[in-house]
Image: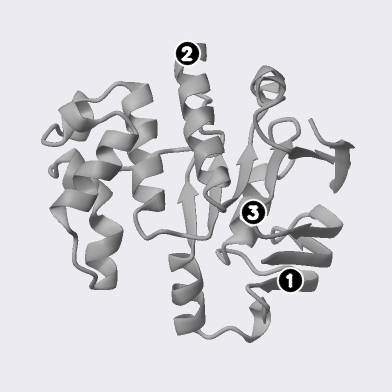
Amino acid sequence: MIEFQEVSYGYRGGGPLLADISLKLAPGSFHFLTGPSGAGKTTLMKLCYGALVPTSGQMRIFDQDVRQMSRDDVAETRRRIGVVHQDVQFLDHLSVAENVALPLMVSGAKAEMGDLGDLLGWVGLSGQIEARPPELSGGERQRAALARAVIMSPEIILADEPTGNVDWEMSLRLLQLLVELNRMGKTVLIATHDMNLIRQARGQVPARVLRISNNRVQLAGADL
């Protein structure tokens, strides 16, 4: 689904942030991505959904070479990849339901209120459907972000530090939602610095742990 072949990436004016990465995210796989702050976790995520193009090497998303993808190809690809960003952004003048439904509106798809209600119920936000984002707690914002990321029924879920600003109980709840998505056949990649979260996944899902160290991605452990 997503394949890196000796991929490197560096920002203008600096050396490579990521170098010689060879990695494959197979259908239905579950990965954790770890590494210290500034190591390049968010950059690797952006490469995965086509927001960045490798400086060198080859990268394929859904069997398409990213360098040969048109703007329309990139837009279509992003409909198949749900992203939970580290810095969650909402439109404060819209309700939670309207914010979650935005990807459908942008794509021209019709939002079925029953389906939307089921999705918000799944993430535990049935009581906040008409609330505005400033009224939500940190955990509720993260769950709303996850609902928005999966409303287009993507094949891949990328979550960048989804538990970074919530307590342990909410971290476990978010992890359980992501595990459920994986059991539904979704490919999941979670960037996190929380090793306790990774340990908690033991016994729930066959996950692989990837670690960015010295600009490279290494397999940090076998199946949890």
Spatial CA distance of label 1 from label 3 is 19 Å
Label 1: how many Cα within 10 Å (few below 14, some 14–19, many 20+):
many
Write down the quadrant of residue 4 in the picture.
Answer: bottom right
Observer able to see residue 167:
no
* Coordinates of residue 220 in the picture (x, y in percent): 86, 35
Spatial CA distance of label 1 from label 2 is 37 Å
Q: Amino acid at mark 3?
A: Gly
Disc 2 versus disc 3: nearer the observer:
3
Label 2: how many Cα within 10 Å (few below 14, some 14–19, many 20+):
few
Q: For mark 1, give the secondary structure.
A: strand
* Coordinates of residue 76 in the picture (x, y in percent): 45, 75
Q: Residue at x 47, y 13 (%)?
A: 169
* Coordinates of residue 60 in the picture (x, y in percent): 70, 73
Write down the quadrant of residue 208 in the picture.
Answer: top right
**Residue 6, relative to residue 65: is it above or below?**
above
Q: Amino acid at mark 2?
A: Glu
Q: For mark 2, give the secondary structure.
A: helix
Q: To which residue does mark 1 refer?
A: 59
Q: Residue at x 56, y 53 (%)?
A: 186
Q: To which residue does mark 2 refer?
A: 169
N-terminal-most mark, 1 or 2? 1
* Coordinates of residue 47 in the picture (x, y in percent): 64, 61
Q: To which residue does mark 3 refer?
A: 28
N-terminal-most mark, 2 or 3? 3
